[in-house]
Image (spheres, rainbow, N blue to C red):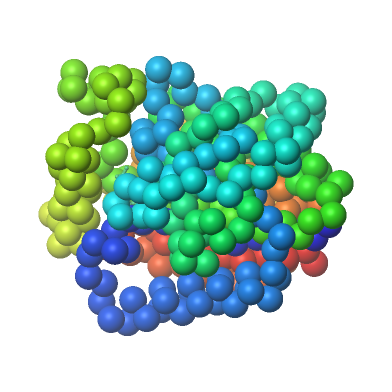
Amino acid sequence: MSLALVATSHSPLLHHVELAPDVSAELENAFEQARTFVREFDPDIVVNFGPDHYNGFFYRLMPPFCIGYSAESIGDYGSQAGRLDVPEELARELAEYVLDKGIDLAVSLDMQVDHGAVQPMEILYGDITAKPLVPVFLNSVAPPFTPLSRVRLLGEAIGRFLATRDEKVLLIASGGLSHDPPVPRLATATPDQRSMLLGDGGPLSPDARAARQQRVIDAAREFAAGTATIQDLAPEWDKELLRILASGDLSPLDAWTPEEMTRTAGNSSHEVRTWIAAYAALGAAGPYAVQYSYYRPIRELIAGFGLTTALPA
Ligand SMILES: O=C(O)CCc1cccc(O)c1O
Ligand SMILES: [Fe+2]
């Protein structure tokens, strides 16, 4: 067994807004560093820690964690649609192992995933089917949230399972860091939004999807112009998180409450759960060292944008 990790923010706005040329070049350099890293590691399989934004998981039944035995990307914001190459047998063995260690999770025989799960594969490989991939969903937008200690334990159990395997495994985490894009929320939902959040009515109509995406694109333009009402990015919180993840000791995160995360870093800051799980998985196999670390708060993307790579030390 050997492990490697790429954790990166995602933002569908990458393809829908203009960035200053220097920021764009800097970001492209970060992506290129990650591409070189995965090319050199040359994984056999990917374990992909991703959130969802009410495209595959709804309040009709919202699990904290779910492993997909089979999965399909819905293709929102122009992301690549279609089935992922999920090794079903491995996904099942992983889910059984994690449950056996006392970490409750759901399984899906047909997981639907959105940009939040697939964008790193698009950035790294230009193809979401480039590697066999086991999708691990962590609820990161739909309160109530499980404590971070449970996220850490999920990651550790996955890391221990992977330590028993022969494959070279790339751990991918997707999301965060601080950010507060205008994703509909149950607490403030209109009746129509509430029905959408429940998952009633099936897939959004093309018009409804276009309207939903345009609302986020408009919010990003306003946020960059300084006129949006969404919560500001929290660079100090982001840097503290990156410091803790790089330290190899994730236990300080057990004291971070979901409420405080939301208050300080925004409703979608919970996407950092994917990073915590992936780093915990890497750490379960032994000491690690961060190889590359990029961070910049990018209002045009509505993201405290981070990208790190890490390897066993
Ligand atoms: O439309 C949505 O559901 C949210 C889109 C979105 C925007 C900025 C950063 C993100 O992480 C993100 O997911
Ligand atoms: Fe997201």
Q: Is residue 48 above or below residue 291?
A: above
The x, y position of residue 275, in whole percent, is: 57, 50
Dividing the picture into quarters, in which one does residue 13 lie?
Answer: bottom left
Query: Which residue: 84% across, 54% down?
Result: 166
Report the number of numbered marks.
0
Is residue 68 shown to the viewer in this render?
Answer: yes
Question: Where residue 237 appears, x then y in whole percent?
Answer: 47, 53
Left or right: 212 as drawn, with respect to 162: left
Residue closest to the eye, 279 or 72? 72
Decide: is 128 above or below 107. Answer: below
Query: Residue 105: x, y in percent?
Result: 63, 26
Instruction: Residue at 56%, 52% (x, y): give it.
Output: 173
Q: Quadrant of residue 190?
A: top left
Front one among 263 and 128: 128
Viewer-nearest residue: 75 or 223: 75
Image quadrant where one finds the N terminus: bottom right
| Above or below, comparing residue 219 to residue 107 in the picture | below
> Does residue 4 lie above or below 53 as drawn?
below
Q: Which quarter of the image is occupied by the C terminus?
A: bottom right
Q: Which residue sits at x=47%, y=66%?
A: 126
Q: Residue 8 location, x and y as percent?
A: 50, 59
Residue 263 visible here: no
Quick check: 203 left or right of 285?
A: left
Residue at the image position 38 percent from the left and 43 percent from the top: 74
